[in-house]
Image (cartoon, rainbow, N blue to C red):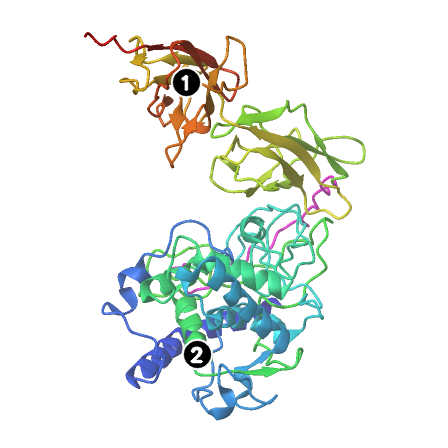
Amino acid sequence: MSALFGRRLRRGATTTAVAAAAIAALSASQAPGAIPTDPGGAQSAADANPPAGSTATGNSPYYTELPPLTTPDGPSTSIDLPAAIGTGPAEAGIPATVLAAYKQAEQALAESKPGCNLPWQLLAAIGKVESGQARGGRVDANGTTTSPILGPVLNGIGFANISDTDNGAYDGDSTHDRAVGPMQFIPSTWATWGQDANGDGRKDPNNIYDAALAAAEYLCHADRDLSVDADLRQAILSYNRSQEYLSTVLTWFEYYNKGTHEVPDGTGVLPVGTGPADPGPSPSPTPPPSPEAPKPPKPSDPATPGGDSGNPSTPGGGSTTPPPSTEPTTPPTTPAPKPVVERIEKTDTGTLTAVAGSQFTERTSVRAVDAAGEPVADVPVRFEIVGDTDARFVSGKSALTLSTGEDGTATAPPVEAGEQTGEFAIRASVDVKGVADVEYTASVTARQADGLTRTGDEELTAESGTAFEDRISVEATYKGEAASGVAATATMITAAGGSAPRADGPYFKDAAGNPLRELTDLETDADGVLLLPKIYADDTTGTFLLRIETEGGATLTVELKVTAPPAETP
């Protein structure tokens, strides 16, 4: 396998020039949909400065074969009306389920992120380069590959060195990571971007529906608009930071933009040569095999210095001379298997309650343990806020994945309560068969005030039949701080301690000018201040009481005096 794989990588070094020539030819032809060339050529800003951070594939190797020079134009290869099976160049045929997954992902992003302008042909181009369209469409009725698609072990021998992040759950390797599935996600990236697009309750990187939607979300993040050339190039480079990779994907993207047709699952064109999409062993937490023999790196791209020296598919990846043999002089030892998670359990988290707009003081935490009750470290735990709520983790997300520590514990970040009151749940889960989820119940109560004071001390007096000159303003506080957005009521009561509004005396007015002696839809402003509407006096004289009450039980009683008008002098 090493020899075959090495041949594929060496062949890839020559296809960079072919890819560039193909793109240039397409651009020069002025054909519809031709890829625009950058003024700066291969070293334009968009190309020379790929996005920072990790890539979807961990810069794993990929298939470098290019499409035929004759593009699939023709009436039978419309991208809107799939042609009869087998019509047109074989490379233009995309297996039915794989094609459906790409189009479903495009539709989902058109609804959730319309500004991204994601075309399904981009997913098809990446899927072709990463796995040969799931190895010619070898998927079952649900879209899951009939055997796992695994990239090489990323152990630093000829490729990048990425230590295990998933306990072997996805790639069957508990020592190092491997790219997984038809879109070749490394496990750590899948933990963040994984999707359940086919509604089976699982986020499976080996399922083409799940993987296509995850790739779509990944390409569209950072507010990219893929109809803009610079954003399109950045998105592709974020998948694999290689100029050759960018050229190869763009060439297939242009090819599929010219037309495709649907073929039955399992009958698509298989990728040429041995590559990352070779079927591998079923994922399991068992110890990985002994390290593979070193593989010669691919020659670097002299036009793009500074690439990832640990990855032969990245430009600038080191010398063109294969490294000297590093065969171990003694047989490698097989690491002891990691403990298997038996269950996750709650820790001693207190009551999860917060006032709307505030932060929960308690944080959710779970512990992963094995069959003997011992803690299991490095287990990815997904925390998700579920239910009818606008509460979010402090990062602004409703779901995230964290790994357990040496004590087997993973603790979610604090949760910010939104304005929506009521109960919701925080669910913790691990992607281990048979391990039940854990849920915490959380509740958000309405904003409250525990103090209420007038902002002025003037006596409130009016003659009967007139209006009070001064409006009443009060300030609400909660634990000494201004309480904004607190619901309040104002009622003209019959006596201290009473609750029913009186039938005479001072009153407010409704929109039609009719008397109102109780207001129920009041709310303090951003500074915790409540300014009441103007108050009017009827013909009843005397001293009256206005009670103001807030959510949380803060109350204030204000005296209103109505006097008779002065007697007329003869």
Compared across the picture, whether 22 is left or right of 150 comes to left
Quadrant where the image shows the N terminus = bottom right
Quadrant where the image shows the C terminus = top left
Residue stretch in magenta:
316-340
Main SS of the magenta part reads loop
Residue where numbered disc 1 is placed: 476
Give the amino acid type for the residue marked by disc 1 in the picture.
Answer: Ala
Give x and y (percent) for residue 555: 48, 14
Using the image as rendered, state which of residue 552 and residue 443 is in the foreground. Answer: 552
Using the image as rendered, state which of residue 155 and residue 411 is in the foreground. Answer: 411
Give the amino acid type for the residue marked by disc 2 in the picture.
Answer: Asn
Residue 536 visible to the viewer: yes
Residue where numbered disc 2 is placed: 257
Give x and y (percent) for residue 277: 60, 68
Image point (33%, 83%), residue name: 25
First along the sequence among labels 2 and 1: 2
Is 447 colored magenta in this rendering? no
- Residue 474: image quadrant is top left
For label 2, the SS is helix
